[in-house]
Image (cartoon, rainbow, N blue to C red):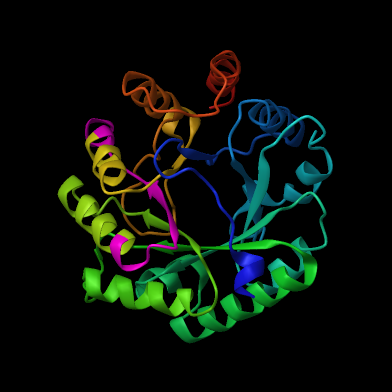
Amino acid sequence: MERRLTKKYYDKNKRITARCRAGIKKIIPTKEKTEYINLLLKVGFDIIDIGSFVSPAAVPQMKDTPEVLENLKLDETNSEISVLVGNSYFAKRLAEYEQVDYINYPFAISEIFQKKNLKANFKKSLKDIDKIIDICIQKNKKPIISISEAFGNPYGEDWGIDILMDWIEVLYDKGLRYLPLADTTASGSAHLIGLVFTNVVKEFPDVEFNFHLHSSPEETIPKIEAAYDAGCRNFDTVFNGMGGCPMTGKELVANTDTLIFYDWMMKNEIENKLKKDKISIVAEKAKSIF
């Protein structure tokens, strides 16, 4: 299983791996959504999260994800496609789509948040993770298990780097070698973020960690720099910083803005695969949608 799940995502010393996510409350027409994602496919992102297979009653915005998948123009892109799922039932359905490369399941190390987000406790979530990994092996997909509340717990539960590392070890023992760490509730300071990545990169040298950051604009760059300096080379971004998880029970905090992140890379001469002219086109499109 480890052989199937392991992949070299980046040159640790040179290139950033970028992912693009999108999220907004108003219902975007399927045609407009598909046109936007097809523009994203031309930018040069490694992975693009294009939607979710979840209950349409809970997240009506994503009910047209199957139709979006069917209309993606994948012939002239090297970007891979990721779709989030709410449980193993949706993962099984999603795995039938050949357009999909990654099945993404969010796992919070806060049981309170996991219940808020997916109505699942730790026991059920771990069973779903096992089933999703098996589905990925059977259908030649790649699992992404994102770890939420990786930089603090605002719900009064115990949290510490040692607790986070224990959960990483649980997923590591399941064969996972690519693990996104998410600050969904903007709980971590730049110092703490740097400390977390310093420890996990050292403890798990063969794991590639990703940073999914929700942050106020003024804190975004210091937090990105803290993660980068500690060895993280995979980052999620969103044009205009749109997003924020509505299931947290907390005030929504924006995702990392793609343009801010790109400008930071350019100023620091960080090698990447993103095409500047295509970024400008998508940025203009994003303004009209968001």
Stretch in magenta: 202-221
Image height check: is 257 above or below 69? above
* Relative depth, front residue between 130 and 241: 130
Instruction: Say left or right for 70 vs 52.
Output: right
Q: Position of residue 115 (x, y in %)?
A: 44, 74
Q: Position of residue 123 (x, y in %)?
A: 48, 86
Residue at image location 49% in from the left, 29% down from the top? 272
Instruction: Say left or right for 226 vs 231.
Output: left
Q: Position of residue 172 (x, y in %)?
A: 46, 74
**The N terminus lies in quadrant:** bottom right
Residue at image location 79% in from the left, 49% down from the top? 99
Image height check: is 105 above or below 187? below
Image height check: is 50 above or below 278? below
Residue 220: say if magenta.
Answer: yes
Residue at image location 41% in from the left, 31% down from the top? 257
Residue at image location 33% in from the left, 78% down from the top? 166
The reply to whether residue 159 is in sight is: no
The reply to whether residue 203 is in sight is: yes
* Relative depth, front residue between 127 and 170: 170
Query: What number of labels is visible?
Result: 0
Q: Position of residue 80 (x, y in %)?
A: 67, 44
